[in-house]
Image (tube, rainbow, N blue to C red):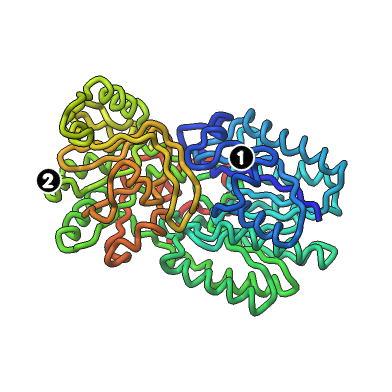
């Protein structure tokens, strides 16, 4: 078989301050930069993302792959019209050429929560354009992120879609392989499988969605058991609760003769709202609890700065948690054993690198001691507009000791995105009053300990670690802590990503969907 493959990955927070323009898809910060043609297979075949799993499965089955485009950008606000049309245009141009030579199916590596300036349901729009080119007879299958806001158009136009089953997403390549299985089922049947779906009437907070915790852990166990018992393929997308369009809500769907029964049973188990309370704390309380517990534990305490999560549309540059750590003297209590990352501040990182070049003295005992003896005055971080209409906390003004410089190149070794290389530009570790801050020039969610190690911070040696993340950090950081129920604390500091979607100024959401959990 000849399979046309392409990818389009963006998680859109329509309330966030920064657009995803064409440059964002070429930056290569936490996703590989824009790929087209044979480079797609070379880049992705051995890494833990869906297209990598699909490529491995396809090659194992002897399928011939016709690679087109893979485009991914760090989560942010809307995908610009220009970027969306360039991506779609390249995919459709390649597809027309492939159809002329003959193809048997299309595989798409999609996120499912991308909103473009000119298309609220941009994945549905892309799938529809592809369908118009290939016709009804050619199967279209796709993989989706667990945070996809799945639309009726996406389900009706595609032959089959399947989503991740873990958050943090450690099963991305597995999902690509599952998409290949769905394609085999579709081809063997000779027509679309029976489809059934049910949508939630409310949004699930991001911080309640981790499959490392209940109720999500239990529900995905039920999903997998139902697949085996009923010969169905179910998906449960808990949704991304910050995309202002009509169909932003969780969805359960499935394929197979028993799909209606299986979907209805899982929906009955998943839909009671009380089980989804996320337990987010005000930042001052979160820091105070972390300091208290760190004094009693020989393992780190982790604080998640969820409202500045660059994996959810934040820019990873706010300073609310850093200000609170300084106010409560965390670095003085545990000198050099409190770390925060990743703080996106390319201007400060550049100043540090320039300062280092000017001040470095040849002949000192060692380059490392020279770095540690240099101090620079900075305004670190950024005050950004938040969903409340006011700015976040101001930059931290002070004298920072330079600990280590880095080129920002880091290959992930943790369970999520294993093998992906991030290119974050000029980076450094700075120290202020015993608090170590990992500063970068590219946006990256702190989901892998190698990001800290890149600037000389060993997470294993810390007492408190602040991660700009909501849940993805759990795969690599939770094993460090003594008790995940106590020692992973979610803090609510001012930022652009609302921990409670009910705080956001919705305009387009269907009146049948509640952004907050029902009381």
Q: In the figure, 430 relative to 262: above or below? A: above
Q: Secondary structure at mark 1?
A: strand
Q: Is residue 445 left or right of residue 251?
A: left
| Residue at the far left in the pictured view | 332
Q: Residue at x 68, y 32 (%)?
A: 85
Q: CA distance from mark 2 to mark 1?
A: 45 Å
Q: Is residue 501 left or right of residue 335?
A: right
| Residue at the far top in the pictured view | 358
Q: Give the labeled residue for mark 1.
A: 71
Q: Position of residue 188 (x, y in %)?
A: 81, 67
First in sequence, mark 2 or 1: give its number.
1
Q: Residue at x 52, y 57 (%)?
A: 202
Q: Position of residue 169 (x, y in %)?
A: 50, 57
| Residue at the far bottom in the pictured view | 229
Q: Residue at x 75, y 73 (%)?
A: 257
Q: Position of residue 57 (x, y in %)?
A: 67, 60
Q: In the figure, 132 relative to 294: above or below? A: above
Q: Give the labeled residue for mark 2.
A: 332
Q: Mark yes or no: residue 112 visible.
A: no
Q: Residue at x 25, y 20 (%)?
A: 358
**The C terminus lies in quadrant:** bottom left
**The N terminus lies in quadrant:** bottom right
> Neighbour class for label 1 at 10 Å: few (<14), some, many (≥20)?
many
Q: Position of residue 456 (x, y in %)?
A: 28, 43
Q: Mark yes or no: residue 120 visible.
A: yes
Q: Which quadrant would residue 482 be assigned to in this image? A: bottom left
Q: Is residue 243 left or right of residue 325?
A: right
Q: Which quadrant would residue 280 be assigned to in this image? A: bottom left
> Neighbour class for label 2 at 10 Å: few (<14), some, many (≥20)?
some
Q: In the figure, 36 relative to 173: above or below? A: above
């Amino acid at each position: 078989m000849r399979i046309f493959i392409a990818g389009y990955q963006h998680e859109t927070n329509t309330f966030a301050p920064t657009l995803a323009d064409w440059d964002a898809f070429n930056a290569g910060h936490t996703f590989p930069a824009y790929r087209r043609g044979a480079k797609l297979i070379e880049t992705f075949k051995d890494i833990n993302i869906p297209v990598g799993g699909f490529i491995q499965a396809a090659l194992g089955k002897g399928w011939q792959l016709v690679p087109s485009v893979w485009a991914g950008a760090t989560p942010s606000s809307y995908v610009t019209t220009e970027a969306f049309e360039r991506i779609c245009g390249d995919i459709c141009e390649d597809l027309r050429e492939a159809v002329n030579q003959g193809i048997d199916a299309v595989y798409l590596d999609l996120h499912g929560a991308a909103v473009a300036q000119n298309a609220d349901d941009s994945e549905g729009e892309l799938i529809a354009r592809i369908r118009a080119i290939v016709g009804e007879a050619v199967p279209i299958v796709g993989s989706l992120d667990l945070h996809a806001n799945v639309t009726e158009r996406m389900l009706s136009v595609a032959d089959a879609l399947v989503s991740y089953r873990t958050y943090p997403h450690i099963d991305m390549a597995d999902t690509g392989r599952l998409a290949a299985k769905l394609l085999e089922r579709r081809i063997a049947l000779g027509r679309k499988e029976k489809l059934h779906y049910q949508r939630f009437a409310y949004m699930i907070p991001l911080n309640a969605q981790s499959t490392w915790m209940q109720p999500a852990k239990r529900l995905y166990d039920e999903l997998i058991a139902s697949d085996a018992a009923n010969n169905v393929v179910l998906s449960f997308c808990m949704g991304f609760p910050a995309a202002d369009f009509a169909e932003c809500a969780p969805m359960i769907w499935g394929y197979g003769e028993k799909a209606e029964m299986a979907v209805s049973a899982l929906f009955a188990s998943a839909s009671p709202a009380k089980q989804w309370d996320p337990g987010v704390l005000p930042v001052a309380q979160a820091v105070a609890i972390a300091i208290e517990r760190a004094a009693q534990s020989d393992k780190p305490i982790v604080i998640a700065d969820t409202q500045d999560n660059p994996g959810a549309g934040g820019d990873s540059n706010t300073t609310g948690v850093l200000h609170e750590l300084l106010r409560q003297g965390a670095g003085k209590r545990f000198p050099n054993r409190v770390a925060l990352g990743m703080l996106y501040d390319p201007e400060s990182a550049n100043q540090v690198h320039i300062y280092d070049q000017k001040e470095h003295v040849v002949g000192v005992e060692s380059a490392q001691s020279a770095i540690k003896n240099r101090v620079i005055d900075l305004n670190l971080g950024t005050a950004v507009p938040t969903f409340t209409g006011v700015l976040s906390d101001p930059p931290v003004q002070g004298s920072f000791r330079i600990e280590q410089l880095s080129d920002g190149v880091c290959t992930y070794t943790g369970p999520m995105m294993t093998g992906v290389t991030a290119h974050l530009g000029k980076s450094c570790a700075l120290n202020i009053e015993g608090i170590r801050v990992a500063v970068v020039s590219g946006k990256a969610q702190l989901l892998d300990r190698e990001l800290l190690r890149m600037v000389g911070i060993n997470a294993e040696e810390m007492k408190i670690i602040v991660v700009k993340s909501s849940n993805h950090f759990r795969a690599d950081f939770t094993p460090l802590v003594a008790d995940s129920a106590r020692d992973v604390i979610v803090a609510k500091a001012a930022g652009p990503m609302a921990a409670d979607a009910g705080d956001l100024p919705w305009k387009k959401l269907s009146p049948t969907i509640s952004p907050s959990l029902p009381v």
